[in-house]
């Protein structure tokens, strides 16, 4: 039931939503209609992880409101797409899921139209920010359509998820700019807030809320979700530098070129191997050869091995936490399997 809902009903909700927005936007301005068409495209091609978590939790507690659950799942996918758009702007990334992202597409249009690089970049940035803002407000518009008693709690869950995600994003930017120390402890805190909140804890709690699971279940779903989110993000740090771009859909040099302060870098700091090449890290004109030197230093310093060990530790901790909960058996099985997939994923 949940598999069908994820790949059928949720996608139908999203398709109907975007079709309505394109219809309303196009008469207002041609480029505004184009923005909404590109927002629709930006939502395609993802794993639909958040909708699946919500639907799994809802089904495990009896699944009393499948239509409302589908709408709520679509709302979380809109939140996800919105935060990706904003994240790309903050990180100045131009690719997402193996293709130019929305900001890059609008910047490309402007360049072809004869605008200067600065003006083209500004047009792309503005489009990315506005697009993300629109999807965040639209998530609440979708939730307002829900008729079951869990709507008010669901609204609170989304607000809390976004509040914590913004705290994590602010940390991430602070670490990158050097306005706050990027210690391993602070990086893990950032992961719990930025990824654990809206990607895992929020959807799980939302599914339970729509099914009337109660406060104890909500607390356990929150704890498990945060643990899974941290596992996901620690693995992501490895993939961001050592992953295959063909598989991940993202550059394996972006984090190194940006000078992103990840757990890999935190573990490497102070080691002679890393110190010798650290001047290359964060260089805007980083070449692939430079990136290979940095990767080699991350291996030689033991940073890669340390983060890989942390992935295993986070998986074990998440599995043990799931086992201790009073959640329905079928959901515990699904979440345990997910922990294994997150630890081993290649994209």
Image (tube, helix red, strand yellow):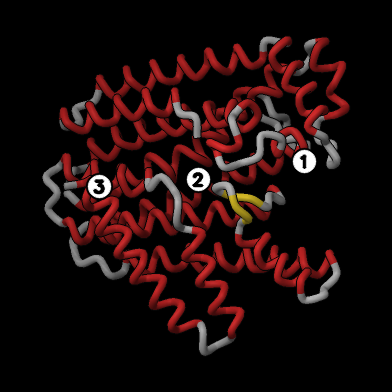
Q: Residue furthest bottom?
A: 27
Question: Image point 64% across, 68% down: which residue?
Answer: 127
Question: Image point 23% across, 53% down: which residue?
Answer: 5
Residue that label 1 marks: 177
Q: For the residue labelled by badge 1, is the local secondary structure a helix, a strand or a loop?
A: helix
Relative to 62, is 18 above or below? Answer: below
| Res 109 seen here | yes
**Which is nearer the eye, 168 or 339?**
339
**Residue 305, image x and y in percent?**
60, 12
C-alpha span from label 2 to label 1: 20 Å
Residue 257: which numbered mark, if any? none
**Residue 263, image x and y in percent?**
63, 24
Question: Image point 39% across, 16% down: which residue?
Answer: 316
Residue that label 2 marks: 164
**Which is nearer the eye, 144 or 334?**
334
Residue that label 3 marks: 55
In the rendered structure, the answer to whether residue 22 lies left or right of residue 69 reads: right
Relative to 24, is 91 above or below? Answer: above
Q: For the residue labelled by badge 3, is the local secondary structure a helix, a strand or a loop?
A: helix
Residue 243: quarter of image:
top right
């Amino acid at each position: 039931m949940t598999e069908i809902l994820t790949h059928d009903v949720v996608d139908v909700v999203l398709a109907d939503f975007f079709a309505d927005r394109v219809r309303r936007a196009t008469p207002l301005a041609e480029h505004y209609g184009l923005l909404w068409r590109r927002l629709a495209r930006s939502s395609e091609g993802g794993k639909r992880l958040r909708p699946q978590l919500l639907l799994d939790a809802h089904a495990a507690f009896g699944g009393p409101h499948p239509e409302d659950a589908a709408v709520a799942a679509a709302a979380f996918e809109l939140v996800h797409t919105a935060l990706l758009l904003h994240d790309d702007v903050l990180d100045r990334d131009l690719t997402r899921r193996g293709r130019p992202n929305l900001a890059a597409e609008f910047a490309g249009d402007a360049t072809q139209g004869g605008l200067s690089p600065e003006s083209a970049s500004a047009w792309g940035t503005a489009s990315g920010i506005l697009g993300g803002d629109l999807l965040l407000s639209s998530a609440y518009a979708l939730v307002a359509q829900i008729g079951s008693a869990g709507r008010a709690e669901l609204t609170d869950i989304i607000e809390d998820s976004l509040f914590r995600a913004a705290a994590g994003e602010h940390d991430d930017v602070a670490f990158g700019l050097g306005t706050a120390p990027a210690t391993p402890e602070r990086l893990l805190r950032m992961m719990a807030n930025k990824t654990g909140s809206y990607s895992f804890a929020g959807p799980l709690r939302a599914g339970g809320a729509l099914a009337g699971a109660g406060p104890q279940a909500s607390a356990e779903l929150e704890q498990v979700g945060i643990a899974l989110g941290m596992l996901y993000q620690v693995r992501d740090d490895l993939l961001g530098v050592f992953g295959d771009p063909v598989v991940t859909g993202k550059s394996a040099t972006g984090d190194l070129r940006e000078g992103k302060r990840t757990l890999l870098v935190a573990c490497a700091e102070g080691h002679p191997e890393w110190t010798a090449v650290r001047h290359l890290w964060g260089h805007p004109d980083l070449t692939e050869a430079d990136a290979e030197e940095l990767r080699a230093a991350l291996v030689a310093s033991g940073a890669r091995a340390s983060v890989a060990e942390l992935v295993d530790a986070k998986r074990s901790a998440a599995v043990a936490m799931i086992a201790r909960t009073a959640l329905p058996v079928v959901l515990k099985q699904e979440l345990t399997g997910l922990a294994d997939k997150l630890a081993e994923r290649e994209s």
